[in-house]
Image (cartoon, helix red, strand yellow):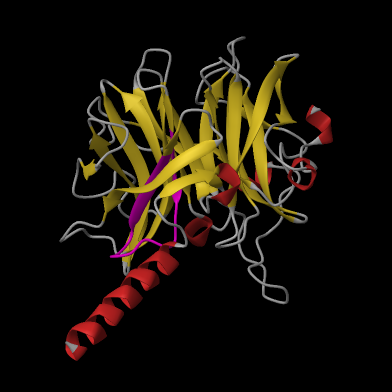
Amino acid sequence: MRMLTIWGKVLVWIILLSINILGVEVGEYNLEEIRLRDPFIVPVAKEGRYYIFGTDWRLPGGPGFLSYHSKDLITWKGPYIVFQRPQGFWADRDYWAPEVHHYRGKYYMFASFKAPGVCRGTQILASENPAGPYQCITEKPVTPENWECLDGTLYLDKNNNPWMVFCHEWVQVNDGEICAMPLSNDLKKATDKPILLFRASEAPWIKRWTPEPGKISKGLVTDGPFLYRISGGELYMLWSSFGKGGYKLALCRSESGELRGPWKQKKTPLYENDGGHGMMFSNFNHEIMLVLHQPNRRLLERPRLFIVAEKNGTLKIDSWQADKETCKGISSELK
């Protein structure tokens, strides 16, 4: 009986430790209670639900991805594991920035992965349902094998041809790049070589990333590209990097209205208060929403939501469900 009591205590300890690793219990949470970076929200009209995905550092049992779902963007249920490293999977670390796109009747997850001695790359997973589970559709990433890449996103051109827009990482090229390459209709391979859209240094406000005070400055970062075409037909891209004061969300516009650009950078970031890696979506009231993470500090980051308005052929963001401290980073140029 004493042995059972001891093992019972051990079991309780293990359960409590697992909860502590997660930092949360499965249940209902307000958005500000969710610790998640690189947030990506998918509205599913037939369910009347929104799904949020992102980078999470605290999964038990190995690396993977979590999601939450909500009917009102305020109260969220979860977390639910939608992908966890399968046996034999090549990558064992840096499971980053999952984003989910509805394409040809399925849900496709674009996510970045890494392993020692192997270049970081974006791999594509698929599921019949937004809630997963997601499974790899290829054995390797779609991004070039000898390139350090991350943050791939899906873009459909005017002929509905699929492209991946992604970052060629600063760790390899120093001046980080945003590139694009056409994909096969099944999203399993590239059908041509990547093209360069722009470099980080083209943003007038950008600064070299310094990991810690007193450390040697590193490269010019490009993170999290996301494309959005406004009602007037203009094509915009969100992306993120570092400037004076920390992490920022940038906005640029294609002067041709097409993916190949040329891309003109806004003089100031769209959001400047140590937040970024954003994306936009339409809510069920047909309002354009922006979600990003803020602050850009590990285990402290939270998803932040804003309403986006089209004004004079550009974009304006206003606060929504956010405190004054968060909202003060909105660029005055775009108010």
Q: Quadrant of the N terminus?
A: bottom left
**Magenta stretch: includes residue 53:** yes
Give the x, y percent position of residue 156. Answer: 40, 22
Q: Quadrant of residue 190?
A: top left
Outermost residue on the front side: it is: 1
Residue closest to the far bottom: 2
* Viewer-side residue, 228 vs 289: 289
Relative to 272, say whether 319 is above or below: above
Q: Residue furthest top?
A: 232
Task: Pick whichever, 168 or 323, lies toward us.
Answer: 323
Relative vertical location of residue 93 with respect to residue 27 in this rendering, above or below: below
Q: Residue at x 65, y 42 (%)?
A: 249
Q: Could you tell me residue 201's position as x and y percent? A: 66, 47
Residue 178 seen in the figure:
no
Front-lying residue, 14 or 187: 14
Instruction: Please state the total of marks drawn on the protein image.
Output: 0
The stretch drawn in magenta includes residue 167: no
Looking at the image, residue 183 lies above or below residue 215: above
Which residue sits at x=58%, y=11%?
Answer: 233
Relative image position of residue 261 (x, y in whole percent): 56, 25
Q: Which residues are magenta?
A: 51-68
Position of 290 relative to 175 (above/below)? above
Residue 160 image offset from top left, x and y in percent? 36, 16
Picture residue at 76% right of the left edge, 40% below the top = 327
Q: Indicate the quadrant containing the C terminus: top left, top right, bottom left or bottom right.
A: top right
Residue at the spot x=67%, y=66% of the render?
210
Residue 181 vs residue 218: left or right?
left
Q: Is residue 11 visible?
A: yes
